Image (tube, rainbow, N blue to C red):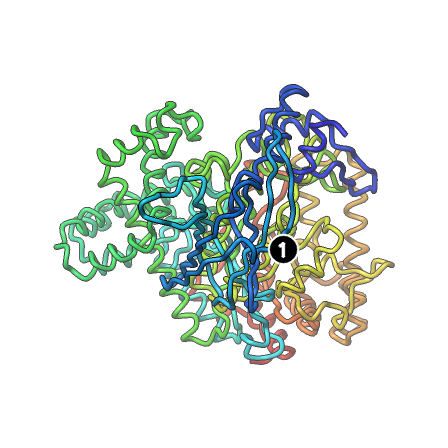
């Protein structure tokens, strides 16, 4: 094995993968070199690789403590301490600082430490010994500090004789459905928040609309409301609107602010005067009546008014309750909020000058480093602008909290069910603030499959598994915790990324040139379990696609529910899985945002779109897909007949196309799934309303109106809609509240 191959193996790059056809594809040396370079290794030549390998193997032996240690609530904890063998005669003084500030201290003598391992580098022997600390510790994030030697103030220890690291005490299993669900099986309504339409919206669904939708869902018998990712995007560029391509997974998208409600609460005369003008009202009416969300128009309406509200807010005295609440929010947000707001101010500054400066990697050199003197000076010179972006986050958090509270008060036993995107875009705030963790020179995606012969490149930047460990997983903790805020459940998109993720070198011809990179699954699932228990939040893992061997049992052990889509759940003969065949600890749904709506599925609408956009290699492939869909539709109708949900005569009429895809058929399909053994069932609002189009057509960007479709019904008319009533009544019969 060459040095390059060995380094790639140690860094987590898997040497081969299997395509959907079963064909094995070995990862090339060029790909290994590109992925290692993205991780920060110098591997241009074999000599470089050998030097990088030697340093990589040497580095852990030159650290007294590793960056992070995981334990359960055990009686004793063994902390490995690494030293040169010549220095192992000195006592070790340790201090454990618990999350609440309480400290525990002690001293261990050399003869009490037992031997774990040893190695030699450059003629210097090193020894790794076990420092045993008394437990158990409370669940949480703690710190350990050790000092080698007596600690005599007259003889200050050198830096090499002092070390600190994180100690994470985590459960093996997150909160269970039994602990949080009011009944054995519950159901909810899911939606794309931007798609909501109301008489008070400004061209896009907002947090007040979410509150009202949650109340409607509760009145219909739902226990939770599912949402698209609410992550922060790019206020300066509203045309970057995919919720799965965020700037940050920690902060919120202020596009969803109900600005009219803020203006009324603030009684801002200037803002209300502008809103009342004919010109503003004309633009507002056009945005409200549009069938597709025009994000640029929405931003053009909202941001100027938000600026006026912020100016009014700044004039309040420092001791006014709103100013004190804002100060508290900023203090709680800490460096993360400050860095995000600073990035948004910088992004607006540079992108406003030149659209070619959209990515921070294109900014002038001094501003690419978030800790540079130029960035600090910008923060001082533009402090008001930075505060404005903090203000947007504060208001978004308040409105989301109110929506969650109103839903729970109306009867949502679980509450909001939020979505965590798999990664962020490399040009965004997360990457700017932590470039050693959010990597450049590589994108994530998926290897070739039946739908994408060249694989998929999602244009998102991976987290470095090595950087995560160096930083005690804090960026991952922050993303999980932020998504659980105001939530009763979360969905982790492409949850297989906890074990491995497909990386593609920047500039690669296709995803075929990528490779899987391993992540520390056990550590990540224990963090999820800890945050799940702390926030009393259920976790669902979207495990669609190629699932690595052993992954689903690991999810089950961690208490992460699996994700099952009716379209895909089949027997070996292609027949649909009977309701009793679904895993108990699963969330079940008919469709998802990336798949055709139920009515669109029956009609083959997704295939028609692909044909219209020339996404098929030839007419024959399109014809095969249409034929396959008709056969699948017949199989589904046969399953409904077998369950006694439709009579055979009606089934024949649907098969023959003599009867339209109506609410009776849509309700029967949902009742079929509602009978399943899955603990949670989600009903897409588009499916319940009989919408034909889907939210997103994978493989397209601008040719299909992804993430822009609005519901055809006003929010005020939803509860009385007969299609929605028929579907929810069918689900309630199987899953009563």
Image coords of residue 370 (percent x, y)? 37, 34
What percent of the width, then of the height, locates residue 377?
Answer: 25, 31
Residue at 43% x, 70% y: name it: 407
Left/right placement of residue 581 relative to residue 526 reads right
Q: Residues within 10 Å of mark 1 (few under 14, many from 20)?
A: some
Residue 381 in picture, x, y percent from top left: 22, 33
Question: Residue, x 15% and y 52% (percent of image)?
Answer: 269
The residue sitting at 66% across, 69% down in the picture is: 585
Q: Is residue 320 visible?
A: yes
Quadrant of the image occupied by residue 511: top right
Q: Is residue 260 left or right of residue 552?
A: left
Residue 60 place in picture, x, y as percent:
57, 40
Residue at point 81%, 49% (across, down):
627
What residue did someone put label 1 on? 522
Is 150 left or right of 191, judged from the image as shown? left
For the C terminus, the image quarter is bottom right
At mark 1, the secondary structure is: helix
- 215 above or below 265? below
| Residue 593 higher or lower than 434, as above or below | below
The residue lying toward the viewer, choosing from 387 and 633, is 387
Q: Nearer the viewer, residue 628 or 88?
A: 88
Residue 711 seen by the camera: no
**Quadrant in the picture for the N terminus:** top right
Using the image, determine if residue 238 lies above or below residue 41.
below
């Amino acid at each position: 094995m060459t040095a390059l191959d060995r380094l790639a193996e140690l860094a987590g790059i898997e040497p081969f993968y299997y395509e959907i056809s079963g064909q094995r594809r070995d990862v090339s040396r060029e790909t290994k070199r590109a992925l290692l370079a993205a991780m920060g290794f110098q591997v241009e030549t074999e000599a470089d690789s050998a030097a990088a390998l030697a340093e990589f193997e040497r580095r852990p032996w030159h650290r007294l403590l590793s960056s992070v240690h995981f334990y359960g609530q055990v009686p004793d904890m063994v902390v490995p301490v690494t030293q040169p063998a010549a220095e192992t005669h000195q006592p070790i003084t340790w201090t454990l600082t618990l999350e609440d500030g309480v400290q525990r201290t002690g001293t261990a003598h050399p003869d009490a430490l037992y031997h774990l391992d040893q190695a030699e580098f450059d003629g210097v022997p090193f020894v790794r010994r076990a420092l045993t600390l008394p437990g158990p510790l409370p669940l949480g994030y703690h710190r350990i500090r050790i000092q080698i030697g007596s600690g005599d103030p007259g003889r200050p220890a050198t830096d090499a004789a002092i070390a600190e690291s994180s100690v994470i005490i985590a459960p093996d299993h997150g909160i269970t459905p039994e602990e949080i669900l009011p009944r054995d099986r519950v159901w909810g309504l899911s939606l794309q928040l931007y798609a909501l339409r109301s008489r008070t919206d400004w061209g896009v669904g907002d947090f007040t609309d979410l509150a009202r939708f949650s109340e409607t869902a509760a009145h219909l018998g739902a226990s939770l409301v599912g949402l698209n990712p609410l992550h922060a995007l790019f206020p300066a560029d509203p045309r970057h609107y995919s919720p799965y391509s965020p700037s940050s997974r920690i902060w919120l998208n202020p596009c969803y602010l109900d600005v009219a409600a803020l203006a009324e609460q603030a009684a801002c005369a200037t803002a209300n005067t502008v809103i009342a003008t004919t010109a503003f009202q004309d633009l507002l009416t056009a945005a409200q009546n549009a069938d597709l969300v025009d994000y640029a128009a929405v931003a053009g309406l909202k941001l100027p008014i938000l600026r006026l509200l912020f100016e009014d807010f700044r004039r309040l005295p420092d001791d006014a309750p709103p100013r004190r609440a804002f100060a508290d929010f900023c203090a709680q947000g800490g460096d993360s909020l400050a860095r995000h707001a600073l990035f948004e101010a910088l992004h607006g500054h540079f992108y406003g000058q030149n659209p070619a400066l959209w990515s921070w990697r294109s900014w002038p050199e001094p501003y690419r480093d978030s800790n540079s003197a130029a960035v600090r000076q910008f923060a001082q010179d533009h402090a008001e602008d930075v505060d404005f972006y903090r203000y947007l986050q504060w208001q978004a958090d308040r409105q989301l909290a109110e929506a969650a509270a109103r839903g729970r008060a109306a009867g949502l036993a679980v509450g909001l069910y939020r979505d965590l995107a798999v990664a962020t875009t490399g040009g965004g705030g997360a990457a700017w603030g932590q470039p050693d963790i959010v990597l450049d020179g590589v994108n994530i995606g998926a290897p070739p499959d039946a739908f994408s012969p060249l694989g998929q490149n999602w244009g998102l930047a991976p987290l470095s598994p090595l950087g995560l460990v160096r930083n005690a997983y804090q960026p991952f903790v922050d993303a999980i915790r932020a998504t659980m805020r105001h939530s009763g459940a979360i969905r982790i998109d492409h949850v297989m990324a906890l074990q491995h993720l497909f990386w593609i070198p920047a500039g690669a011809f296709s995803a075929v040139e990528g490779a899987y990179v391993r992540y520390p699954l056990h550590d990540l699932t224990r963090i999820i379990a800890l945050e799940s228990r702390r926030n009393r939040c259920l976790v669902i893992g979207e495990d669609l696609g190629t699932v690595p061997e052993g992954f689903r049992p690991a999810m089950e052990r961690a208490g992460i529910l699996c994700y099952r889509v009716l379209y895909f759940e089949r027997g070996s003969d292609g027949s649909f899985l009977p309701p009793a065949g679904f895993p108990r600890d699963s969330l079940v749904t008919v469709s998802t945002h990336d798949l055709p709506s139920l009515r669109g599925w029956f009609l083959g609408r997704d295939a028609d779109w692909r044909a219209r956009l020339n996404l098929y290699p030839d007419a024959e492939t399109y014809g095969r897909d249409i034929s396959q869909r008709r056969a699948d539709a017949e199989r589904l109708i046969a399953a409904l007949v077998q369950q006694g949900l439709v009579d055979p005569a009606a089934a024949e009429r649907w098969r023959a196309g003599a009867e339209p895809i109506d609410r009776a058929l849509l309700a029967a399909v949902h009742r079929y799934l509602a009978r399943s053994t899955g603990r949670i069932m989600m009903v897409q609002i588009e499916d319940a309303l009989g919408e034909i189009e889907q939210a997103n057509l994978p493989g397209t960007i601008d040719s299909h109106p992804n993430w822009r479709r609005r519901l055809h019904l006003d929010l005020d008319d939803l509860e009385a809609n007969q299609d929605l009533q028929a579907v929810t009544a069918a689900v309630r019969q199987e899953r009563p509240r």
